[in-house]
Image: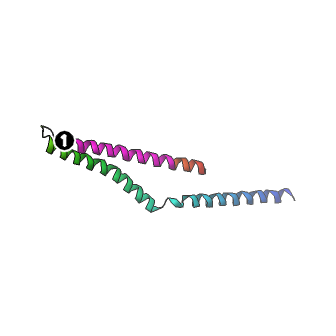
Amino acid sequence: MDKNQEMQNQILSQQVSAQANRKLKAQRKTGRSIWSGFGMFGLIGWSVTVPTLLGAMLGIWLDRRYPGTHSWTLTLLIIGLFTGCWNAAHWVAKESKEMLEEEAKDE
């Protein structure tokens, strides 16, 4: 075989390899569909909503049992909201880290 033929074979081999890698990468990413994105929005929403509602319910219970000069409901609602937002930020950071690691692994 002459050098020209070897070079053409090497180029063809590189093109086939690159196409196969793209195909494998696309197959691995099929788990992340639009529905999984909506599911993540739901998870983040519930991670904020649940602590907020629990804080409000505990605050209402405390206000009824132990009335005072300040509102337990408002205080615990705000604490629950901040806790939920911290929880949601934690989930988003975790997912973002996993996505970046997956992209780095694919390259």
List x then y, in percent, for residue 101: 54, 47
Residue sitting at x 41%, y 58%: 39
- Decide if residue 10 is on the left or right side of residue 30: right
Which amino acid is tagged 1? Trp
Q: Residue furthest right?
A: 1
Residue sitting at x 37%, y 52%: 44
Crowding around mark 1 (Cα neighbors within 10 Å: few <14, some 14 to 19, many 20+) is: many
State the predominant SS element of the stretch in magenta.
helix
- Residue on which disc 1 sits: 72
Q: Viewer-proximal residue, 18 or 105?
A: 105
Q: Which span is picked out in magenta?
A: 70-98
- Decide if residue 82 is on the left or right side of residue 36: left
List x then y, in percent, for residue 48: 32, 49
List x then y, in percent, for residue 59: 20, 44
| Secondary structure at numbered mark 1 | helix
- How are the residues colored? rainbow
- Decide if residue 33 is on the left or right side of residue 18: left
What is the quadrant of the N terminus in the image?
Answer: bottom right
Q: Residue furthest top?
A: 69
In the image, is residue 16 part of the stretch drawn in magenta? no
Numbered circles on residues, count: 1
In the image, is residue 81 part of the stretch drawn in magenta? yes
Q: Viewer-proximal residue, 71 or 57?
A: 57
Residue sitting at x 38%, y 54%: 43
